[in-house]
Amino acid sequence: MEFRLLGSVAVVTESGDVPLGPVKRATLLAVLLLRPNTPVSVDRLTEALWEQEPPLHFKTVVQGHVSRLRALLAAHGAREYGIELATHGAAYELQMPESLVDAHRFEELVGLARVQRQPADTVRMLREALACWQGPALTGTVRSGPLEAAAAGLEDLRLAAVEALAEAYGQLGEHGRAAAVLRTEAVAHPLRESLA
């Protein structure tokens, strides 16, 4: 079982993507995955699920999405992977090995790339890290303030990895590859000076 945040929010099993249902359910999952093994309050979930004022029955809606998400995970063998969606009073916690989340693997690989002594090893690790990305982070979620901020933070980490990859290519004397990596991102992010 794998959880994706770096592109469309998804739960992937050996048999394919698990249908998450409504956007709000995918959003709830994304918020929990951004803080695995940490209780997330109903208030924080509500802020992410509704851009405007939440409905009067928002707690019931949140509970319903949690219940259906819990059932989906159970139906796809989540316990076998050490995954449990736990309730802690007015908070929910997705207990799980963080290595099952693509964003965690990405950050871990980028961290390992930073301490490599050989540019070729740095290139290999950064390419593997960047391969975790399937598109813009947190696609398919409610575009609320908290999720916009999280997506922007993840995108900044991705761009820093791209810049580090170009630098490592340069250290290897592969200036054409370095330029190609930067050129692609400079078009998408014209205001980011380090890509120019």
Image (tube, grey):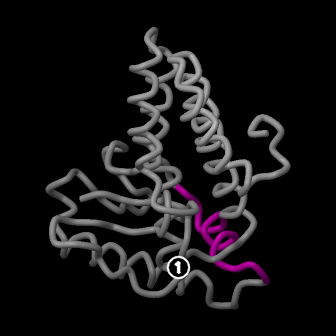
Name the residue located 48 percent from the left edge and 59 percent from the top edge.
5
Q: Left of 18 or right of it: where is 42? A: right
Up the image or down, 155 lies above or below 23; here it is above
Picture residue at 29% right of the left edge, 76% below the top: 18
The residue type indicated by label 1 comes to Val
Q: Residue furthest bottom?
A: 56
Report if residue 127 lies within the magenta region: no
Vertical comparison of 123 with 59: above or below = above
Taking depth in this image into account, of 174 and 57 the one nearest to the observer is 174
Foreground pick, 84 / 171: 171
Q: On the rendered structure, is 120 left or right of 135?
A: left
Of residues 195 and 131, the one nearer the viewer is: 195
Is 42 part of what is drawn in magenta? yes
Q: Main secondary structure of the magenta part?
A: helix
Viewer-side residue, 29 vs 109: 109
Residue 121 rendering spot, x and y as whole percentages: 39, 20
User: Which stretch is magenta?
Assistant: 40-52
* Residue 48, horizontal then vertical, whole percent: 65, 70
Using the rendered view, name the quadrant where residue 108 is placed.
Answer: top left
- Rendered location of residue 115, percent (x, y): 48, 15
- Residue 95 is situated, as x and y percent measured from the top left of the image, at 35, 51
Circle 1: element type: helix
Q: Pointer 1: what residue?
A: 62
In the rendered view, tell whether residue 42 sits above or below residue 184: below
Assign the C terminus to one quadrant of the image.
top right
